[in-house]
Amino acid sequence: MSEELELEDLKGVGSKTAEKLDEAGLNEGMSIATMSAGELAEKADLGESSAQTIITSARQKVDVGGFETGMDKHERRKGMKRITTSCEAFDEILGGGIESQCITEFYGEYGSAKTQISHQLAVNVQLPEGAGGMDRGAVYIDTEDTFTPERVEQMAEDKDLDPEEVLENIHVARAFNSDHQVLLAEEAQDICQENDIGLVVVDSLTAQFRSDYVGRGELAERQQKLNKHMNTLLRLANSHNAAVVVTNQVMSNPDQMFGDPTKAIGGHIVAHNSAVRLYLRKSKKDKRIARLVDSPYMPEGEAVFKVKDRGIIGDN
Ligand SMILES: Nc1ncnc2c1ncn2[C@@H]1O[C@H](COP(=O)(O)OP(=O)(O)O)[C@@H](O)[C@H]1O
Ligand SMILES: [Mg+2]
């Protein structure tokens, strides 16, 4: 499939429509091909039927999936890359590290190391291939204002990487509310295209949604937006062969009388959109336990790791 698809090669796209699409940031075949007509019509200010024509044409030009043979899938997955967590046992339960082409979710209570892992992966993706990385940069959507350049420097030094260079290769944006977060993920499409990005982090995926939609009546709307947001992220993963890592809190609110205290927020929508799910919990001192809860092909498993000044390490 071509990432350099010319907009005007699409059926129903003249110079004016091409301009509209371009203004809406839709200059990539895969993005258009995986949208619904309503979504495209709204974003690019088009009629629904013209939007449908464009989408159909885009789908014919790019390979969006649908049915494929087992062999096709096998070929696609051969291009899959992995990022090391810096802990051997942790990588092992994941089948070798965090995968590209899908969303990996880390959920756990406050202090369970979700943000530390996010930092570590933003560093590790920059390691050479063969040394646990992809030799590519990262996009980091920070919704809780916890991105810490000093932590990145410490972790980079430990890997013998140039800390300044590593920071240069992490494109950080602070999301101020859930709408802003959604917008940033859409804009990441451009950043991924202009820079060589192998990892997109959203830390935290759900915090802003949780505070923006408090009433019960708003739950459906929240879930719908979250679903769309995750579709945008999945599109990034597929069109750039990138790993997407999202973090999620658990409902550990003691005021909450009902519900499992270890249940991730975001419910089915987040769980369904995350191919790989890991539950993190605190153990003694600097020890943390990661449990693989959901994976398309790996069995459930647990790994112990530690958080140190130099970053994530194994427990031995
Ligand atoms: N420089 C450091 N050295 C050792 N441990 C650290 C360091 N920085 C953070 N930590 C550990 O990481 C924990 C916070 O983890 P964090 O990833 O922020 O949690 P979460 O995002 O899940 O709320 C702290 O409780 C602390 O134990
Ligand atoms: Mg955090």
Image: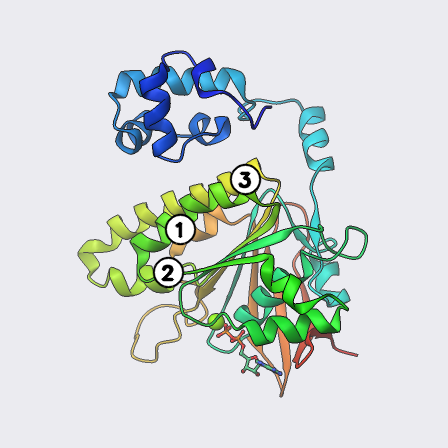
Q: Earlier in the sequence, mark 2 or mark 1?
A: 2
Which of the numbered marks, if any, corresponds to residue 175?
A: 2
Where residue 22 appears, as percent x and y from the top left, is 38, 30
Q: Along the horizontal axis of the image, is 225 left or right of 160? A: left
Element at label 2: loop
Calculate the distance from the C-alpha at mark 2 to the C-alpha at mark 1.
Answer: 7 Å
> Label 3 crowding class (10 Å Cα cut-off): few <14, some 14-19, many 20+?
some
Mark toward the viewer: 1 or 3: 3
Toward which corner of the image does residue 174 lie, by quadrant?
Answer: bottom left
User: Please, what is the three-letter code of the amino acid marked with disc 1?
Assistant: Leu
Element at label 3: helix
> Label 1 crowding class (10 Å Cα cut-off): few <14, some 14-19, many 20+?
some
Q: Along the horizontal axis of the image, is 43 left or right of 187? A: left
What residue is shown at x 49% (from left), y 20% (from top)? 6
**Residue at numbered disc 1:** 184
What residue is shown at x 46% (from left), y 70% (from top)? 262
Element at label 1: helix
